[in-house]
Amino acid sequence: MKNRVKRNHWYEGITEAIQMYIPGNKVYRTIQARRARTGTLFILPLIIGFLLFMVRPLYLSFIMSLSKVVVVEGTMSRFNISLNILGKNLIVPFGNYNYAFVSDPDFNKLLVDEIGRMAINTIATLVMSFVIAVILNQNFKGRTVCRIIFFLPVILSSGVLPGIEKQNAYFNLMTSISDAVEKSSGVDLSRSLQNLLSVSGVAQEVFDVIFKMIDSIYDIVMASGIQIIVFLTGLQSISPSLYEAAEVEGCSAWESFWKITFPMVSPLLLVNCIYTIIDFFMKNDNTVMEHINTLMYGTQMDFGAASAESWIYFGVALVFIGISTFIITRAVKSYE
Amino acid sequence: MSKNNTVFIGESKSFRERNRRSNGYLLKHTAGQITISIVRALLMFGLCFMIIQPLITRFSVSLMAAEDIYDSTIRLLPRNVTLDNYRIVAELTSMPQSMINTAWISLVMSLCQIVSTTLVAYGFARFEFPLKKFWFACVVVLIIIPPQTIQTALFMSFTHFDILGIFKATTGSDINLRSSLIPYTAMCLTCMGLKDGLYIYMLRQYFRSVPVSLEEAAYVDGCGTMHTFLKIMLPDAVPTIASCFLFSFVWQWTDLFYTRNFISGYKIYSRELSNITSIMGKYFARNATENVTVPLGRQMQLIGIGVFICCVPLIILYAFTQKTFVQSLAMTGSKE
């Protein structure tokens, strides 16, 4: 299917593409055209859905991000500001974006914080879920029970459930009290370990990060339900005969882990990494999301600024997904 | 079988003797195995306990009578065991009806989602067609865009539903589809439902990993595209599809966002659960005339029961399905 005819003009590709769908010409009868039509039929639901339900809302939200929206009066007008670009004063409708980056007191800080937490959490979640999946894939007593229990986070951290208790004022009170009690009286094991290790002169920052991870291990396990299952299905699909052959050739378990298990599951690493990043960005208790929501539905009702901030947020998420895809596909390729 | 005189290593000999024969390898091996299983057991126990501890607490608290909650001598085991709380929560969430609605709506929606996403994923994995990159970018947008961004616009378009002004022209008014199931079913059928982008991505990743030679063989033997898809690709994909179905069912079950916005005409458990605090006040006000504000501990207890009830069917479902879907995966692996 790769042997395309060399094109002389840029528009020939487009005409060819259109001809694929119109009967009665030479291109229509080719096998490529037939495959293309079948493929288009297969993804037709997506095309219809996207055009019907996605385009207009996306367009509206983009327009809103460029305008000053007054909800009470129901008016919308361009939010213009003049910017100095390359020595010229240009009038651009980026007032809301300007607000998000310059005037909004919290947005920048929250965004940077979230990105930092996201980076650490993603790595921790991936490692954690991979280790757990490898363990769950081994044969031991009570494996079924363990698998069921490790599925619980998928349920417990989905939809209405995590929010319902957090929104309760009493719950917040309780957690703050228990935190305070723990800090004042209880022995904070990781804290004392941390002191011990940092006294002995090992790099402070590294340990800070690691101990932060250990402290938030509950959150990490709660966030890694899906990833464990995805890794587990990947591990299950590795043929046992591969391990047998490796063992016959004298591979140790350690070697066959790195030479068989890891390369075989590494494609799933990408899926999981992307999922983790998105899950982290979209979580309801994410501070940036909260900020956007209060901006939109709080007292300010500033739809314009909220839309602009969510577009910025969307862009940032996209950039991070791009970066991680790039890194992981490179790393995975080196194994093949 | 008759035994011959040859003595194999490890047959009817003491451990010490066998160890001597293997030059100490056996002892090393056994010790290693035992250490690994102890470490594994500790790790699994700790993590599992961490996950189910909140559920256990919730369960024991749920059995407590109102006076037990404030008794500081009672920690885990209730003194006055009562099932009355369950009755109250069931009434608060209009139980049998809301649960039945949740069950069949989740089932129908996740079936719609899985059918459409499987088709689209196969289209993306195997066919070359014009604008393929663009449509896949749309899938990525679907995954990444927070539904909150497009919520308002979608909401409006369903309240005043119209296709190109046809209804307004014929009947004189647009239709309010907000309380019916139609818009959400349409969204699920066209891959715009809850987390549909993710399912497309996961299934596409799976279909891409299946060797093309399988399909080519089918084509050579005279199979049509649809036939090949149904007879060759689908049977192997069943475990992956099943896990996607399970995810979508679980997320649909606990989802609040879509149910609140698009299926407000039906009593859905998750929505009832999110309103439980406000209903609680009314409920207790009706029964006992003087006390309207429900004490916070009691509130927490009832909410905990609500969450518990929400999880139990899903846990049971997973307990039954996990064996089939995880083990059938192992079978697909041994084919190649």
Image (cartoon, coloured by chain):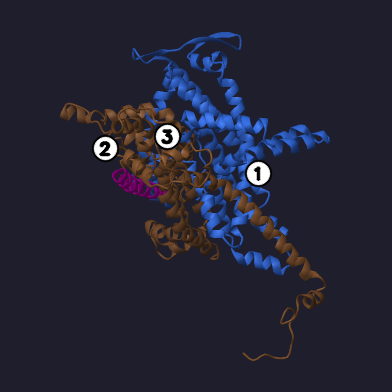
Chain colours: A blue, B brown
Q: Is residue B169 left or right of residue B276?
A: left
Residue A5 falls left or right of residue A335? left
The amino acid sitting under disc 1 is Arg
Q: Nearer the viewer, mark 1 or mark 3?
A: 3
Front position among marks 2 and 3: 3
Secondary element under disc 3, as helix, strand or loop, is helix
Which badge, 2 or 3, is on the more N-terminal residue? 2
Amino acid bearing label 2: Ser
Instruction: Give the image location of residue B52, x and y in percent.
Output: 53, 48
Provide the major secondary structure of the magenta segment. Answer: helix
Q: Badge 1: how crowded within 10 Å, few (<14), some, or many (20+)?
A: few
User: Which residues fall within the magenta stretch?
Assistant: B95-120
Dot 2 corresponds to which residue?
B180
Q: Position of residue A206 (x, y in %)?
A: 74, 35
- Label 1 SS: helix
The correct choice, above or below, for A144 with respect to A96 in the image is: below
Q: Which mark is residue B299?
A: 3
Q: CA distance from mark 1 to mark 2?
A: 48 Å
Q: Could you say which disc has been placed on residue A330 in the image? A: 1
Foreground pick, A182 / A24? A182
> How dense is the environment of label 2, judged by Cα within 10 Å: few (below 14), some, or many (20 and up)?
some
